[in-house]
Image (cartoon, coloured by chain):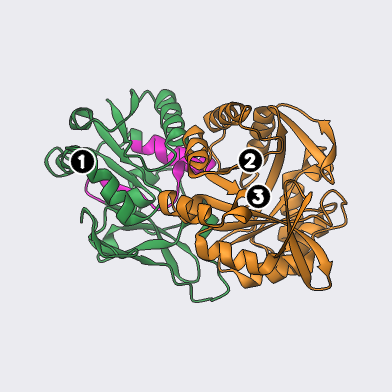
Amino acid sequence: MLKTRIIPCLDVADGRVVKGVNFVDLIDAGDPVEQAQAYDAAGADELCFLDIHATHENRGTMYDLATRTAEHCFMPLTIGGGVRTVEDVRNLLLAGADKVSFNSAAVADPDVVARAADKFGSQCIVCAIDAKTVAPGKWEIFTHGGRKPTGIDAVEFAKTIVAKGAGEILLTSMDRDGTKQGFNIPLTRAIADAVPVPVIASGGVGTLDHLVEGVTEGHASAVLAASIFHFGTYTIAEAKAHMAAAGIPMRLT
Amino acid sequence: MTTVLIDYDSGNLHSAEKAFQRMAAETGAGPVIVTSDPDLVARADRVVLPGDGAFPACRRGLRGFDGLEEALIDAVEARAVPFLGICVGMQMLASWGREYEDVEGFGWIPGEVVRIEPSDPSLKVPHMGWNDLVIDRPHPVLDGLQTGDHAYFVHSYAMRVDDPATLLAHADYGGPVTAIVGKDTVVGTQFHPEKSQRAGLRLIANFLNWRP
């Protein structure tokens, strides 16, 4: 039976791990490769690096990180942040990423996802969607780290981008990110039920019950969290044991 | 004993290279090189064929390198060296791929590659993540692995073997999904051993020390 994945996410800026609270007030919290190795040993199911200050100039830092991580961690690695072109995807895959995540660029030009999926296969193309509640049961996409409204409906966009070739959706609730109040369950479920590909729930995890809810009520295939693992509030093993006890199939190592 | 990983412009070979190099060093299995040079393939003692993306694209990718496919066929059919296919590299061992269009495979494992259709419609495709293996047949490459060990899968198509004797392991995803196949000196894994932590590294070490 396929297991629900727990994915620790490392927000990276200038080669260092940080974690934002509502995307501001960054706190430096260590070396990404060391963190990755610790999560590998702890039984994380995948790892995710998000380059939150991605610019053309500092791209090389992320390639180097991918390469060094892949040398030490024999587990799947997704990299996102500042990915704009098919060439960006290619460079990250060659550097050692297994999956690459588009965000703002996919909103600006959904066809870039189609071109990347044609070239490298849907299995390695993730589309990150950052959505904010604008009315009950209605969510809008925000880009550029949550600063820029787009007027685009998140559920409709998810369907479109999957039809273009995205193999997975990384869904972040901007309302919940950094709040520790739990995933936005209605949003997560609306998108997970609307697309045939796996949805990773993100944004707002504060307790282990939140992880359970993301799967049982939000219908997510995977749960992503940063702070609760990063600052040692819970271990991966505790999270897995808690989810397994709630009846969710987990890979217990 | 030299092992070559075939590089034919099909995605990320970095982690596969590192995983094979690490296990080769640990078990004294000799050098591991990544190449698309047919002459190096012709002299290799072991061959690993990875593959990401769509079956037809991978097949065309291989043919894009002059003499590479011939060297692979010679390695298996004339020299009978141990051969491991990974993901689409495993799928290409089949007789036919049915992804987008009908494309011939190497035919070393009779069967075809078809879209996964889970009996439970709520199951997502691609089949992505960790699934537990059910070992169907013992094989030297599976030494130390057992039913219940987890492997990392990412795929939307899967192989259906004609001869059950070639099915070494499967996973369950709304029905059986072929996980490991083997026949004579050829083995293949649908999952990514280089991404599968303990079980994956063990399988790689076993392959590097397999003397069929």
Residue B27 position in % (x across, y down): 40, 26
Q: Which residues are magenta?
A: B183-207
Marks 1 and 3 on same chain: no
- Residue named by callout 1: B72
Q: Secondary structure at mark 1?
A: helix
The quadrant holding residue A184 is bottom right
- Residue named by callout 3: A104
Comparing B24 with A99, the one in front is A99
The residue that appears at 35% across and 27% down in the rendered structure is B32
Q: CA distance from mark 2 to mark 1?
A: 39 Å
Marks 2 and 1 on same chain: no
Point out the frontmost of discs 2 and 1. Answer: 2
Labelled pair 2, 1 in contact (Cβ < 8 Å): no
Q: CA distance from mark 3 to mark 2?
A: 8 Å
User: Disc 3 or 2, which lies upstream in sequence?
Assistant: 2
Query: Label 2: few (<14), some or many (≥20) within 10 Å?
Result: many
With respect to residue B119, does A1 lie above or below?
Answer: above
Question: At label 1, which amino acid type do we have?
Answer: Leu
Q: Secondary structure at mark 3?
A: helix
Labelled pair 1, 3 in contact (Cβ < 8 Å): no
Q: Which chain is green?
A: B
Marks 3 and 2 on same chain: yes
Q: Secondary structure at mark 2?
A: loop
Q: Which mark is residue A82?
A: 2
